[in-house]
Image (tube, rainbow, N blue to C red):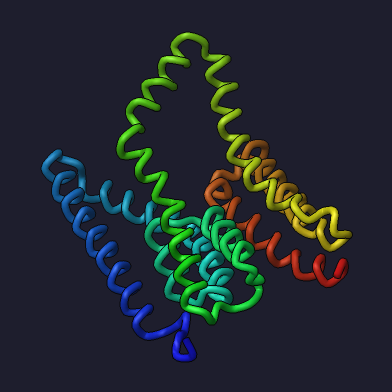
Amino acid sequence: MKDFSVNSIFLFAAAGLVVVFVVVQSVFFLVKAWKRAGELGIARDTLKRVVKGSAVFTIAPAISIILGVITLSKFLGLPLPWLRLSVLGALTYELPAATTAANALGIPIAQGVADPKVYSTIAWVMTLGIMSGLIIITFFSQKIHKGLNKIQSRDKSWASIFNAALFMGMISAFLGMIFAKITTGIVGWIPVFIMLISSVIMLVCGYFVKVRKVRWLEDYAISISMLLSMALSIPVTNLLS
């Protein structure tokens, strides 16, 4: 147990192997797509513009991914967050899953993991939890899609309400974590204040996108909101703690 490290060479090698495989797979399909586009007669200049545009607009989500890796690395080391957020995971899932598992084990999220059993448990919770989405998509996505189309064909207004309700249900799961500790005093309200700050920033970005027609901002609004709200969380926490 004394030799265990969340940043061990073995974990870096294992994570790196998976990431390299995914990168190679992506390059493989990129080459296949490029060749197929040529067969369909699509101009090379058009393909170059598509590739350049796609590369530029991956910067925004990449910033969010880097923030997630940095956030989780303090607790779980670098290899596991790097693996999860490079391949399949998202910060909106990974952090709550890790936090929930750590709380169940009585380990503060701010404290680094030193026990391999705790580390393994958290990794399994994060992995098994997100696998449910893959299973549902693989076996039931077609039925779900047909069901939604059926509802929309009968009543578009009800279909819109139903989709909004599904979305709000997902958001409610995260709101539970934000409001969980408001009874502990002013410190427990810090997540709520940060959420409100983030919401205001998103509203400002939405104003510039919709009213001022600053279209490029649409792809960076989430990253800007995350960066500014995380930066502002430091003075807010210092002020209220």
Location of the C terminus by quadrant is: bottom right
The answer to whether 193 appears left or right of 169 in the picture is: right
Q: Residue at x 57, y 35 (%)?
A: 167
Residue 101 to residue 199: above or below: below
- Picture coordinates of residue 94, whole percent (x, y): 52, 59
Q: Nearer the viewer, residue 194 or 18?
A: 18
- Picture coordinates of residue 207, whole percent (x, y): 69, 41
Q: Residue at x 38, y 38 (%)?
A: 136
Q: Nearer the viewer, residue 144 or 105?
A: 105
Determine the image quadrant of residue 215: top right
Q: Residue at x 19, y 58 (%)?
A: 28
Residue 197 visible to the viewer: no
- Picture coordinates of residue 81, whole percent (x, y): 47, 68
Residue furthest left as drawn: 39
Number of marks in the rendered image: 0
Determine the image quadrant of residue 144: top left
Determine the image quadrant of residue 85: bottom left
The answer to whether 177 appears left or right of 163 in the picture is: right
- Picture coordinates of residue 39, whole percent (x, y): 11, 42
Residue furthest bottom as drawn: 2
Residue 76 to residue 104: above or below: below
Q: Nearer the viewer, residue 59 or 142?
A: 142
Q: Residue at x 41, y 45 (%)?
A: 132
Residue 55 visible to the viewer: yes
